[in-house]
Amino acid sequence: MQTNYIFVTGGVASSLGKGITTASLAAILEARNLKVTIMKLDPYINIDPGTISPMQHGEVFVTEDGAETDLDLGHYERFIRTKMSKYNNLTSGQIYSEVLRKERRGDYLGATVQVIPHITNAIKERIIKCAKGYDIILVEIGGTVGDIESLPFLEAIRQMAVDLSRRHTMYIHLTLVPYIAAAREFKTKPTQHSVKELLSIGIQPDVLICRSNQAVSINTRAKIASFCNILDKAVISLIDVNPIYNILFLLESQNLDKYICQYFKLQVPLANLSEWKKIVDTEAKPIDKVTIGMVGKYVELPDAYKSVIEALQHGGLKNRITVNIKFIDSREIERKGVELLKSLAGILVPGGFGSSGIEGTLISTKYARENKIPYLGICLGMQIALIEYARNVAGIKNADSTEFSPDCKYPLVVLTSSHILNEDKKQYHNETYLGGTMRLGSQQCKLIPNSLVRKIYNTDIIFERHRHRYEVNNFLLKPIEEAGMRIVGRSNNRLVEIIEISDHPWFIGCQFHPEFNSTPRYGHPLFTAFIKAAHEYQKNSQKSFT
Ligand code: GLN
């Protein structure tokens, strides 16, 4: 089958949920037996978001093949079965660096190198490469129509309708249709302007998805259709829903998937959304609730922990338990003490970089350990758990990570060159280059028998994704193991991947990021077990819980 291209642009305002909407539509098409993938085009000049502060950009989602990508790729993997790769996230930075490399090599044979055709051609090549082998590719263009920086992407997708035939290309535009309560009216003008902007660069949208806080009336939709030159049935109303999986049902009930299949002339069965229905039903009827404290330093922008938040919710779904997350700034713990940790059913210390807020995570980890509160430490959280144990149980007061204390006397967590280690990619840590130089992507880990994690995963070998620069120092571990900390998972080259404490009901730290492998349909063993343990702790404890 020839690949069909659906381009998704956004208008009027940002943060309308373009990523979730694109992923939801892809899930419906996948449920119609189509082979679907999704690509994100990001207009910024960074090669990837790996070097952007989490406070600016939110989480960096890591693919199996070790690419540092936009957090929307996390939505894509949570909604469809296709795994994302380094080809699924394209930035202007990647395009420009590729074109400039070719220019220096003389590939353009004396031509003047220009945005059109050289940059646009490079964009089109990357989209076609990513689409290979799929029935449908949805291509989400980051930013909002009208942004100067996304113009080359829009020009490239405009050209694709000419190159590939209009019949195999579809343009979906997501806009905001505000409801003005005082006038009791929906306002269509911003949408009209946004479509006009698209038309001025030669793109006529085929579908409009209108975000609003209440269902857009039929009359308003008909008005939008007529002003924007679109069929009535292709103007879709999308209200705010909770849980987000309801978006699938909103789109399907308005026959968007049917319209798309007719447009591309695809003879496929109706969408089987039973798995998604089950998720929505489970979420609606919880048996109980727990509150998990997440102690980190990027808590002001929860998007910085997007996949961890989602994975906790999936863990809740698997146990039929509503998970409330209390975001706690680790620096607040330093100021106010453990009072903030009272009445939590579980404590999670997620990934992080740099030395600020470390003391607060150490205090929280000690509190979880001493009070037998279920604890999950992810990446930095595992390193912290080890340092805390070394200092307070094994009595090694100066144990530390060289990340926070470069000259420390007992460097338990260090920058090694032995991990370097993305052997297949031949990437080497280099002090002067920060981008793409960490230990990245999916790697194998061997679990040891008679451990809690072996029981949780119910298998000996697991594959999980990494994103970190520092590793546990195997040479200094002995006294810490003797004091009772267990190393229960190691990589092929013997790096510490998982730790446990035997005299604690549920205390696990992992060097990898399990959240990247969690999906609403399947959950993730670690998160499912963590929520279960938190619920048990809550049931058996005399404390009062929030
Ligand atoms: N800063 C730590 C390291 O680089 C942990 C990274 C993380 O939590 N992702 O090893």
Image (spheres, helix red, strand yellow):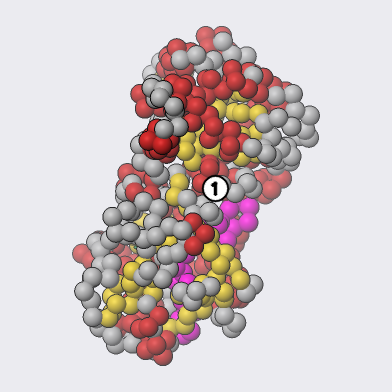
The residue sitting at 62% across, 31% down in the picture is 251
* Residue 247 in sight: no
Q: Is residue 369 magenta?
A: no
Q: Quadrant of residue 108?
A: top left
Where does the magenta region start and end?
497-524
Camera-side residue of 437 and 489: 437
Residue, disc 1: 85
In the displayed structure, 215 sits above or below 81; it is: above
Give 431 or 372, whichever is nearer the viewer: 431
Q: Position of residue 103 (x, y in %)?
A: 40, 32
Q: Amino acid at mark 1?
A: Ser
Residue 290 percent coordinates (x, y): 48, 62
- Coordinates of residue 450 in the picture (x, y in percent): 59, 83
Q: Secondary structure at mark 1?
A: loop
Q: Position of residue 526 (x, y in %)?
A: 54, 66
Q: Residue at x 43, y 83 (%)?
A: 485
Label 1 beta carbon within 8 A of ligand 1: no
- Name the residue: 30% across, 72% down: 401
Q: Is residue 514 magenta?
A: yes
Instruction: State the residue at coordinates (66%, 23%).
Output: 168
Mark 1: few/some/many CA within 10 Å (<14, 14-19, 20+): some
Q: Quadrant of residue 39?
A: top right
Tell me if 107 is positioned left or right of 296 in this view. right
Please state, as top left, top right, bottom left or bottom right, where the C terminus lies in the image.
Answer: bottom left
Q: Quadrant of the N terminus?
A: top right
